[in-house]
Amino acid sequence: MDIKEIQSLIKFVAKSGASEVKLEMEDIKITIRTGAAGSFQEPTYIQQLPMSNPAQQQMHQQASQDMGSPVVEIAAKTEAGANEKYITIKSPIIGTFYRKPSPDKPVFVEVGDTINKGDVLCVIEAMKLFNDIESEVSGKIVKVLVDDSSPVEFDQPLFLVDPS
């Protein structure tokens, strides 16, 4: 579903007089709330899909500025069943996540790499100190959940590892 279809859907719901409409498809969930439920008029919010590229993010940001009163929430459907077999490696500290030891070096791990307990997976900079984040499990990297040079919170998921 592209941004034009979402905007058309928002306009249709706003004109219909419905106070809330929920639409759930394969990979997205959309909830549209209009001001018809009460006198309180809410701002528009769009939650980014995790798989969005920068061009799509700009379209979503532009749409949130153009739409007016309906509230739109777009969220990726969680595939809990598919991710249950994986171990999530989480950030032990708050800081900035780096996949490389320095800008001119290769990344510590790629998707598909086999890792062992104690292998360095990334570096998190906190208060000008660079902390090596080591794996506590052995397995295969399935997914990197954080972009390079992004801020991370305590206990934020960083990697998915298949222990088998």
Image (cartoon, rainbow, N blue to C red):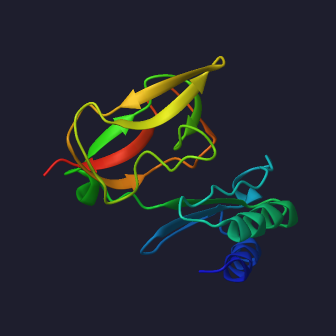
Residue at 19% across, 51% down: 85
Query: Going 33% across and 48% down the picture, which residue do you hit?
Result: 160
Residue 42 x, y percent position in the rendering: 77, 49
The residue shown at (86%, 66%) is 66
Label tally? 0
Query: Is 137 positioned to the left or the right of 147 in the image?
Result: left
Q: Residue 163 at x, y = what percent?
A: 17, 47
Residue pictured at 65% horizontal, 68% vertical? 18
Residue sitting nearer the eye, 38 or 152: 152
Taking depth in this image into account, of 156 and 148 the one nearest to the observer is 148
Residue 25 position, x and y percent, is: 45, 75
The extreme left residue here reads 164
Image quarter for residue 4? Answer: bottom right
In the depicted structure, whether residue 101 falls above or below residue 20:
above
Q: Position of residue 101 (x, y in %)?
A: 53, 37
For the N terminus, give its image quadrant: bottom right
Q: Is residue 52 left or right of residue 144?
A: right
- Tell whether 163 sits left or right of 28: left
Q: Is residue 85 above or below residue 124?
A: below
Residue lying farthest to the front in this orientation: 104
